[in-house]
Image (cartoon, rainbow, N blue to C red):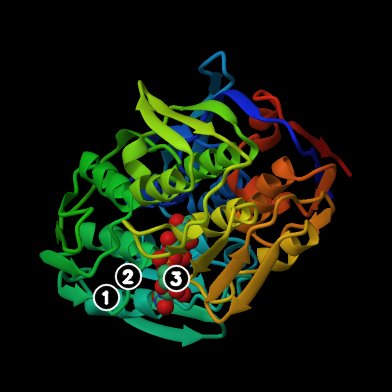
């Protein structure tokens, strides 16, 4: 199993290219199941989760062609991927695939809308909490589908003649369930209105792509989304939006290690709340042409309290990284997680580096320390593991992050991007 070795203490200076967003690429790829034409996606990140989803889609009958090319001197590889699903050859998503990646459960929407049926395994447990699927079941049932659970699978069947548009209010905001409802309702008969929809930029990106395919969706990015069903969707070409979580992660790394870095191919407007928290912590952040410039001071970090919330609030996917930054704040900071239970596994690992953190329910109290010391640590989930990298960049001596396959799920060429900016980060294979 690969490990990442970090020798802390170097400031970061230079350019970091930001990849296409994993959390947008996954639903966009799944949308290719909705049409028999070719959907072309540009700026698809090269990540373990994307590769796995390619395999899952292949199972349902999607043909994939990839052109990779080096786009810029700073080393960003933007891949263009063509997806063609002439016919759906299998409407079952099996347990061994869905259990490896939760987002693959979302194929239930397009399979049901296009084929009238889907048999999709329940995703099962997850390191960051129970993460149920009740909202998907209720939402699709509102469109007229019969939803039954049998042998660990959801058997979904559309009424004769297809799904029927309806008005549905989500009792809780869910990114995944909003994606699935938009995809399913695009091919339903009549108009669907989704109330209390997720407002994440990735929802807007999916709506834009579906509209380019011929869907009639309005209101994405607000709490109410209206979808006028159409009888079929066509192919389209769409560019995946920049990864706001990767952007925020590197901005926090610079704030932590100090230095001056331009994050390229990204957009400051995607992460207002996180930028605001970073500025309050003392980082200087400005929009520049095609990106964001971050200047960090490393040793003068001010404590800032944050609470995770659905967009436009502070993203849960940046919570662990921000906590990493706060471990060296000059004072006490509080981090409250409201989206997922059990999303504090990084606390024990950060403590191994010398952080002082106490947990009280959903809130962590972080007493900033003057210095962290490198140590072997264990990556536990995707975002938690990158918080250990951030902390390692500012720790004295060597930090070894074990189980980095978690990082490879969501961060494209992390060690290369950091090394180019002067960090000492290397992958140890085997
Ligand atoms: C997506 C992102 C993930 C991010 C999360 C919150 C992808 C691949 N994943 O995950 O990185 O952390 O949004 O921004 O894009 N819930 C229910 N019932 C349901 C569905 C969800 O109770 O049927 C709950 C979840 O347990 C959680 C909350 O709703 O507490 C939000 O979940 P959701 O927005 O669905 O997260 P994901 O789409 O899984």
Task: Give the residue drawn at x 32%, y 76%.
Answer: 172
Figure quadrant of residue 178: bottom left
Circle 3 or circle 1, nearest the eye: 3
Residue 278 position in % (x across, y down): 46, 46
State how far apart marks 3 and 1 are (Cα).
Answer: 15 Å
Q: Is residue 380 left or right of residue 136?
A: right
Of pointers 3 and 1, the one earlier in the residue sequence: 1
- The residue closer to the viewer here, 59 or 254, is 254
The answer to the question of whether label 1 and label 2 lie on touching residues, with beta carbons closer than 8 A, is yes
User: Badge 3: how crowded within 10 Å, few (<14), some, or many (20+)?
Assistant: many
Image coordinates of residue 145 in percent, x first then y, are 28, 77
Mark 3 Cβ and ligand 1 under 8 Å apart:
yes
Q: Residues within 10 Å of mark 1 (few under 14, many from 20)?
A: some
For disc 1, the marked residue is 170
Query: In the image, which disc is placed on residue 339?
Result: 3
- The residue at the point 16 percent across, 63 percent down is 224
Compute the Cα span from label 3 to label 2: 10 Å
Ligand 1 resides in the quarter of the picture at bottom left
Q: Nearer the viewer, residue 385 or 220?
A: 385
Residue 196 horizontal side relative to residue 110, left or right: left
Question: To which residue does mark 2 refer?
Answer: 173
Q: Is mark 2 within 8 Å of ligand 1?
A: yes
Would residue 201 be seen by someone viewing this image from the given angle? yes
Q: Residue at x 61, y 24 (%)?
A: 13
């Amino acid at each position: 199993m690969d490990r990442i070795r970090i020798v802390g203490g170097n400031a970061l200076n230079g350019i970091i290219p930001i990849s296409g967003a994993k959390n947008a690429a996954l639903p966009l790829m799944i949308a290719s199941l909705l049409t028999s034409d070719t959907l072309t996606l540009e700026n698809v990140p090269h990540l373990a989760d994307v590769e796995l989803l390619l395999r899952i889609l292949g199972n349902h009958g999607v043909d994939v062609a990839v052109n990779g090319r080096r786009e810029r001197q700073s080393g960003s590889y933007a891949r263009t991927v063509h997806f063609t699903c002439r016919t759906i050859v299998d409407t079952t998503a099996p347990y061994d695939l869905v259990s490896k990646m939760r987002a693959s459960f979302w194929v239930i929407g397009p399979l049901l809308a296009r084929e009238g049926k889907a048999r999709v395994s329940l995703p099962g447990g997850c390191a960051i909490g129970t993460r149920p699927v009740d909202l998907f079941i209720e939402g699709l049932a509102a469109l007229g589908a019969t939803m039954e659970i049998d042998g660990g699978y959801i058997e979904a069947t559309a009424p004769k003649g297809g799904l029927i548009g309806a008005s549905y209010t989500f009792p809780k905001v869910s990114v995944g369930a909003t994606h699935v409802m938009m995809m399913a309702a695009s091919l339903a008969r009549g108009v669907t209105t989704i109330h209390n929809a997720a407002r994440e930029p990735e929802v807007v990106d999916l709506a834009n792509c579906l509209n380019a395919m011929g869907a009639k969706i309005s209101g994405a990015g607000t709490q109410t989304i209206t979808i006028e069903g159409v009888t079929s969707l066509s192919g389209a070409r769409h560019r995946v939006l920049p990864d706001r979580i990767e952007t925020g992660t590197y901005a926090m790394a610079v704030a932590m290690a100090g230095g001056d870095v331009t994050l390229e191919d990204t957009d400051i407007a995607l992460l207002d709340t996180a930028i605001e928290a970073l500025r309050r912590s003392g980082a200087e952040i400005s929009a520049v042409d095609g990106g964001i410039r971050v200047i960090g001071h490393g040793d003068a970090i001010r404590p800032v309290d944050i609470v995770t919330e659905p967009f436009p609030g502070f993203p849960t996917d940046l919570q662990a990284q921000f906590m990493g930054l706060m471990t060296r704040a000059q004072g006490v900071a509080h981090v409250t997680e409201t989206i997922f239970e059990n999303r504090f596994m990084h606390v024990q690992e950060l403590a191994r580096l010398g952080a002082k953190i106490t947990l009280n329910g959903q809130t962590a109290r972080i007493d900033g320390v003057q210095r962290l010391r490198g140590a072997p640590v264990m990556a536990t989930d995707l975002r938690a593991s990158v918080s250990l990298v951030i902390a390692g960049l500012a720790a004295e001596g060597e930090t070894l992050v074990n189980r980095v396959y978690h990082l490879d799920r969501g961060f494209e060429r992390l060690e290369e991007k950091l090394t180019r900016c002067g960090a000492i980060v290397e992958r140890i294979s085997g």
